[in-house]
Image (cartoon, rainbow, N blue to C red):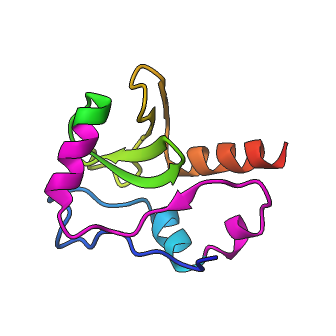
Amino acid sequence: MRNSFTPYSNKILPKGFSFPKEYIELSKNLSYVNSIQYFNWWFEDYREDIEQHISILQKLTGKENLISFARDLDWAACFDLTDHSGDPKVYVYDLGNRENHYVVNNFDEWLQGEINKAKE
């Protein structure tokens, strides 16, 4: 089991976008989520070609400017790279059926919701 993951660096990300502070903190230490038996999401390391990654997600979701940060089988949790708030919404898509998706207010709410589901 991995203890950390590597997010995209600010050099690669579009100007104005920043990951939530809590996401960056989690990237350094996954021990808490790793300790939750049924927490199935795995956090993605950055990819060299961010443009290709964005393009693939657009084809699968129909939404522009998404970057995924976590996966659970066909499900992908994504940030919108045009959100400059520092606390972006999380877009969660079933990549096999783009009509099956939902939006969460921010990373903290998404993570807590997934932790709660895993503990049920």
Looking at this view, name the residue that lies furthest to the top: 99
| Residue 48 belongs to magenta span | yes
Residue 49 or residue 111, whichever sits in front: 49
Span of residues in magenta: 30-58
Count of residue discs = 0
Asked where in the image residue 11 lies, by quadrant, the reply is bottom left
Q: Is residue 40 above or below residue 90?
A: below
- x then y, percent, for residue 72: 56, 48
> Residue 93: x, y in percent?
44, 34
User: Where is residue 83, by image quadrant?
Assistant: top left
Residue 8 placement: quadrant: bottom left
Residue 60's x, y, as percent?
30, 34
Q: Residue at x 17, y 64 (%)?
A: 49
- Which quarter shows the N terminus? bottom right
Q: Quadrant of the C terminus?
A: top right
Q: Which residue is drawn at the image coordinates 25% and 56% (left, top)?
A: 17
Q: Is residue 82 visible?
A: no
Q: Position of residue 57 (x, y in %)?
A: 28, 42
Front-most of residues 106 and 47: 47
Q: Is residue 46 above or below residue 96?
A: below
> Is 38 situated left or right of 108 in this image?
right
Up the image or down, 7 lies above or below 37; here it is below
Work out whether 11 lies above or below 82: below
Q: Residue at x 54, y 46 (%)?
A: 73
- 35 left or right of 70? right
- At horizontal 76% and vertical 48% (from top left) the residue drawn is 118
Horizontal side, residue 1 vs residue 45: left or right: right
Can residue 112 be seen by looking at this rendering? yes
Q: Is residue 35 magenta?
A: yes
